[in-house]
Amino acid sequence: MRAITIAGFLLCLAMAVTLEVLARREANRIAPLATLLDRVMATRSARIGILLFWWWLGWHFLVGQTV
C-alpha cells in the first residue's frame, strides 16, 4: 500500500511539471503557476484559507503520527 501511495504522489508531481511546461510553451491556453498564484493570492481571505489548508494538511500528515 505504501508503494501505491508513493507512486500516486510521484504521478501527481509528474503531471504538475508537465502542466507547467505546457503552460510556459502555450501561455494563451494555460496560465503558468506564477500567474495562477498571483490571482489566487490577491485577496486576504484566500491567503488565510490557503494558510489554514496547509496547517490542516501538516497537522494530519506530519504531526498526527507523532502526537
Image: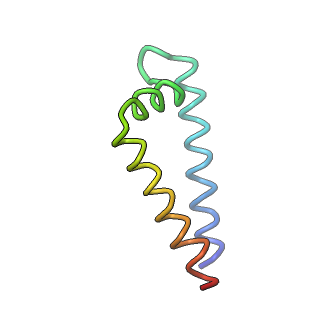
Q: Horizontal placement of 48 versus 12: left or right?
A: left
For image coordinates 61% across by 38% down, the residue present is: 17
In the rendered image of this protein, does residue 13 appear above or below residue 67?
Answer: above
In the rendered image of this protein, does residue 16 appear above or below residue 42?
Answer: below
In the rendering, at what x and y percent does residue 62 appear? 61, 71
For image coordinates 58% across by 69% down, the residue present is: 5
User: Residue farthest to the top?
Assistant: 28
Q: Quadrant of the N terminus?
A: bottom right
Q: Horizontal placement of 40 versus 24: left or right?
A: left
For image coordinates 44% across by 24% down, the residue present is: 30
Colour mapping used in the image: rainbow
In the rendered image of this protein, does residue 37 appear above or below residue 3?
Answer: above
In the rendering, at what x and y percent does residue 38 appear? 46, 27
User: Residue farthest to the front?
Assistant: 44
In the rendering, at what x and y percent does residue 7 appear? 63, 63
For image coordinates 64% across by 66% down, the residue present is: 6
Q: Horizontal placement of 46 versus 35: left or right?
A: left
User: How many marks are shown on the rendered structure?
Assistant: 0
In the rendering, at what x and y percent does residue 42 appear? 39, 29
Q: Quadrant of the C terminus?
A: bottom right
